[in-house]
Amino acid sequence: MAFPQTPLDIQADLKIGGVWQNITADVFTRDLMTIIRGRPDEGSRSDPGKLKLTLNNGRSKVNPAVSGRYSDGNPLSDLYGYIGRNTPVRVHLPASTSHLELDGDPAGYVSTPHVAALNITGDLDVRAEFDADMTLTAGNLGILGKWGTVDADRSWFLRYFDGNITFIWLDSGALVHSTNISIERYGGAVLRVTLDVDNGASGHTVRFYQGDTITGPWTQLFTDIVGAGTTSLQSTTSALRIGPSDASTTPPRTPFVGNATRFQVRSGIDGTLVADADFRPLAHGAAGFTDSVGRVWTVNGTATVRKRSDRMVGEISTWPPRWDVSGNDRWVPVEAAGILRRLGQGAAALQSPLRRRIPAYSPLAYWPLEEGAQATRAYSPIPGVAPLTLTGVNWAANSDLISSGPLPVWAAGTGPSAVMQGTVPAPAGATTGWQVAWVYRLDTPPPTTLRTIMRINTTGTVREWRIQSKDSQSKIFGVDIDGNTVVDQGIGTSNNIFGTWVASHFRVSESGGTVTYTVVWSDIHGSAGSYTNTVAATAGRVTNVGSPPGGFSSELDGMAMGHIAVFGTTTTSAYTSALDAWTPEYAGQRMVRLGSEENVPVSVRGVIADQEEMGAQRMLTLLELFGECGDSDGGILMEHRSRPSLRYRGRTTMYNQSPALTLSYTTDGEIAPPLEPIADDADVNNDVTVTRIDGSSARVVLEDGPLSVQAPPDGIGRYDTSVQRSLATDEQAGPIAGWLLHLGTWDAPRYPVVHVDLAAAPHLADAVMAVDQGDVIRLTDLPADVPPGDVDLIVQGYSESFDQYGWDWYAACTPAAPWTVGVVGDTNRGRADTAGTVLAAAATSTATALHFLTTAQQRWVTTAIRPGAFPFDVRLGGEVVTATAITPWLNDLFSRTVSNGWGSPNSGPAWTVVGGSASDFSVGSGYGTQLLATVDVSRRVSIPAVHADFDMYCDVSTSATATGDSLYAAPTARMLDSDNMYMARVAFTTANAATVVLRKLVAGVGTDLGTYTVPGYTHTAGAFIRLRFQATGSALRVKAWPATQAEPDVWHIAASDTSITAANSFGTRSIRVTGNTNGATAAIRYANFIVVNPQTVTATRSVNGIVKAQTAGTGVRLATPCIVPL
């Protein structure tokens, strides 16, 4: 029997001496074991995880010979000296599937011996489903390969190295090939690499992919990596290893640290499966297995197959012993915390980017010069290097350099000159070159005389080098031990080495009695100039750096300088990227780098290159810098559940998620009480300002809608917020403000807490254990008194409590719907929503023909134009309906033959004819005819309209050109009768012109509202003029053009009039007046009469279970609108 009929198999372990030890028997079941993880809201920063449990501190059941086992100061405890502050602890539960766990120990790996099937020499397809910490930018982690420690045993290898995922192979000639992609392109999903040894174009191709499962679908992470010439794989008999290592490499290669589910090797791309290490079906602790294709695998050393689900890995900081007055009951209540607690406990701000970066490159000497205002000398963080003396300056007077703390400014004035002297220790071994680097800012260069910026003393032929500058020239000057000039090289330089921060590098190398000297100037935007030359000399080593013997010239007053370093090599990237404080740098990229620098494991989920680019790295604590990254990108920084490391979940990983857990309200235990939706203003932000730190701001305001800044009832009032973000450019602030406004104005109830009772719903155990921060859960079958339909929620954090027969899980949630964003080409998520649509007419609860009136911007797509765009769902008045077709409300192509009337259009109600006799009306040859057999009698047709607002097209023509007087043709709207209407009337004149008049008839009195003559047009019988006639409220507009031409962009007539406001009817009106001599055969022709707005929607009603009549004016939106993501 299983839980809850039998006790829940909770296990607690302590890490003692580097090995996990089961202490479950000493965990009291009288107290609930509780775990809290995550964040309480949508902030980017999770709280440290918490684990509470009570340990038996009487006679131990784990070691019955010991009492007081968990008193860390008890010398009689077998754990004395092993437990104390921040002792690792983990709690885990049974899982339905297993996984591989590697701890980075070279002895811990999984292998299968060579067989003929693994001897692949052609195309290769390698796949790895694993979760590893790949933080150390200089790390060397083996993932999978047939790769021994000598070339004869090497075929191919997949690894993480130096910030890249690398695929290496040896060809049949033992030539090494290597390709890689930056880790910033990998999103932490299943990794796949293919090698096409002969791409058919005299080359070979490597491709890197990622996917959600080991069978795809796949997303290529980078463009094809194509090499010249065909290639091959060396035939070897080496074993295939998961987590291969090699202690002889620099740095030593070790297995990755993390979990893995499955690895595959295929001979050929999508070819024959030759290795399939699937750990899911294995027993807990399995020492070996045979895979689906017959490979026999061995689990070695510390590698472990675990069929357990870690609920939390934490650290116990205190062990407070407790007892009752009798002394018979003794216990230790412990509270473990996640790694975030330790990282934030008393943490100091990190030093400046340059100060942190430069010492990592092993300088012989380095002086940051970031001292306080009262300093008298500059210390060196390099052991054995004496302080640098510097006088005649104002310390800490310049804070302009974003990558540094405040630096000194030369300020001799009329007093003694600024004097600087720094002694450089000798390198440990012989060297053939060296480099001196520094950063400076000099806004006003010496106008006429070259002045020394840096003086360098050496043991070489050139005993003293001087780097000098003035406004348009620089110089490298060098003298020997006797003061004789050896180098006197002028260099033409521009003003781009002044007025900004510049890193200067002076490099000297020696080869065959020749010294090559180079000076390079680099500003924070790139290279500002360089010069290289040679001289017959020896390089020697640097002994001192500083000012000229008499001090710096007073013409250098105002110059700021710092970060002076001397290297025993001519090449270093110590200043690269650090000079501009790592701007720009992707959020996840910054986290990985900082984690590497601070030895804090960090993994990133989501493609790093899709994340926001950060601004300058400030002097903050590590967690504050991590928090800035999360704030800027909008993702979640969390603790890893299975190991003491951090994980950053990028914003884009939370877009368009499928639910990780689906809960039915009608199934016992799946949604336990309380479930309390709240529609409040707790998270509303409808006026958002985002300010880029040290940059500009962007403000976005929601002006319309129920959560807009308008006063109730039209809105909710103003809820403003202003935030600062670290951003690489000012342009990023606007989109981020828009995204925060979108999240802050989502109009739906919140479900702050969802409770699952696992004792009542044990079938959900595996799914619940798989849910982590940022995942989506779905609530179904909710009560009728909440908004209809399923509810998707993002889990921001959770708490859970266990005892032997109980397990309750509480998820802290926020709406997931705002994270459903547009996808180009997707038939559901790729559809742009309407900017404004209402029901043009009321509809019963069962009506399947609905009339949509678009009130802003683009109309809805029609079936005739985009048949593949159907069906789709829309929401109106809480009801979701499926639109299966959309047509213009009225569409008449006159593709029929009718006498004594006009019959019915292609879509829309039938025409009613009025005026003259029935025989005056007919349809044929693609147009409707109104015969003007008599003068001064209008012929009209009409169809009742569903709304007063409209947008129509109509083509008009005549059967003959006008004689005597004009012939008049007009599409009409809001037409009540012969005496009341608006019309877009065309007068086909006797001069064969087409004059358009926007005209109203009110009580039989006609008034012209605007006139337009179609330019350059000469009318001929049967030639059509196309009219577009539009009205929105009191605004009326008309445009006209020859039907054979494209529609013009501009409206030709616009007017405002409120005389007729009712919908009444659409139609036409034709008339021949006294004076016209065309005779009784003259006729007006109408073609392509189309009312494009409103539109008629064929709908399947109540697809979300809401059955109701809908009123005119009800708003219409897509049920799943396309949201443009950040």
Image: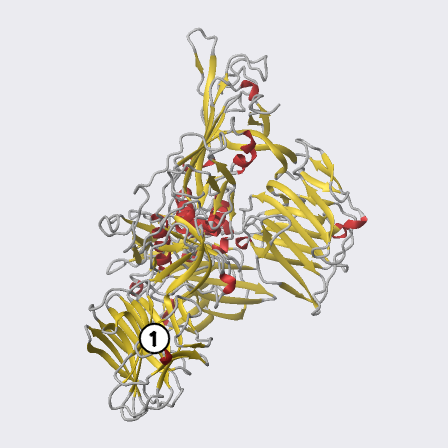
Query: In which quadrant is the N terminus drawn?
Result: top right
Image quadrant occupied by the C terminus: bottom left
Q: Residue at x 53, y 70 (%)?
A: 535
Compared with 363, 1002 (above or below) is below
Quick check: 120 left or right of 892? Answer: right
Q: Quadrant of residue 1034?
A: bottom left
* Residue 146 location (% of width, % of height): 72, 49
Number of numbered discs visible in the structure rendering: 1
Q: Nearer the viewer, residue 37 or 585?
A: 37
In this view of the protein, can residue 119 be seen by the observer? Answer: yes
| Vertical order, 981 against 140 (above or below) | below
Looking at the picture, how far across and down is residue 830, in whole percent? 47, 59
Amino acid type, label 1: Arg
On the image, which quarter does residue 303 sit in? top right
Left or right position of 737 against 80: left
Along the line of sight, which residue is nearer the eye, 954 or 1053?
954
Question: Which residue position is annotated with label 1?
Answer: 1028
> Which residue is most to the right?
116
Local SS, label 1: strand
State left or right for residue 99 relative to residue 755: right
Q: Is residue 639 above or below residue 1019?
A: above
Side of 166 where 613 appears, left or right = left
Tell me which colouring the rendered structure shows. Answer: secondary structure
Residue 380 seen anywhere in this rendered image of the structure: no
Along the viewing direction, whichever of 571 and 1080 lies nearer the viewer = 1080
